[in-house]
Amino acid sequence: MTRADTGPRAGTAPRSDEPTSAPAEAVLTGLRERRSSAGLTTPAPAPGELRAMMSAAMSAPDHGRLKPYRFIVVDSAARAALGDALADAHAEREPDATDAELDRVRAKAHRAPTIVVVVAAPQPHPTIPAWEQRATAACVAHGVVLAADELGYGAIWRTGWFGEAPKVRAHLGLADHEDVTGWIYLGTPTTRPAPRPVVEPAITWLT
């Protein structure tokens, strides 16, 4: 049988007691202990930190190196304009929405001091389908979340129908082929998230 992997125990399942170095264990611990933070306040990552986070996230798997994604940063006063766009979209969808309900929708843009909108921008390609390019954008979004955690900030990846609403898309300046992969809310956690329950991975070892 021919195997593609050429490691020291190619084709075998790793032993449960396989040792790891201290730096490697620190990385694994960070991944295991990462938690989404719903409550976020100032400070948020500074512009230089945001660039570093995005640069690190761009190491995500990217078939063909197409970079089928981009980032939109919403912070400070820009959050108010985004909130208005969200409220307009909600009013269009729910014509009977009350002023109080629209205010709650506007508040969504203020749940964190900074929002990074990760936009998937798939490109026509003869062998790399759009779904694969959107998967790359999702990996990049996850990378931003992980980078925030490593820098000591909190993050939560939010989604929802607002990214598909014409008024919101127009406000963000999305092209027809682009769509919102995620709204990454960033800041300093107001509370410490509860530890994640330990769950054994579902694994099938093929032989």
Image (tube, rainbow, N blue to C red):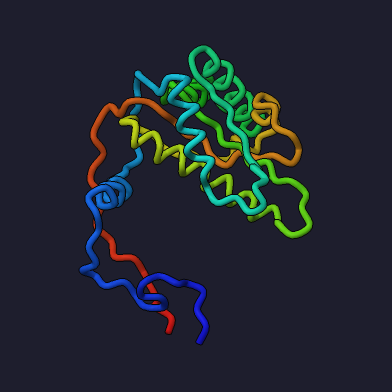
Residue extending furthest bottom?
1
- Give x and y (percent) for residue 112: 41, 24
Considering depth in this image, is 27 or 162 the residue closer to the camera? Answer: 27
Considering depth in this image, is 87 or 134 the residue closer to the camera? Answer: 134
Decide: is 170 above or below 68.
above
Considering depth in this image, is 198 or 92 the residue closer to the camera? Answer: 198
- Give x and y (percent) for residue 99: 53, 19
- Residue sitting at 29 percent across and 65 percent down? 200
Q: State left or right for residue 160 relative to residue 121.
A: left
Decide: is 49 above or below 141.
above
- Residue sitting at 63 percent across and 24 percent down? 88
Q: State left or right for residue 26 relative to residue 106.
A: left
Q: State left or right for residue 178 relative to residue 80.
A: right
- Residue sitting at 46 percent across and 30 percent down? 52
Considering depth in this image, is 201 or 46 the residue closer to the camera? Answer: 46
Q: In which quarter of the image is the C terminus?
A: bottom left
- Give x and y (percent) for residue 136: 58, 49
- Give x and y (percent) for residue 49: 43, 25
Residue extending furthest top?
77
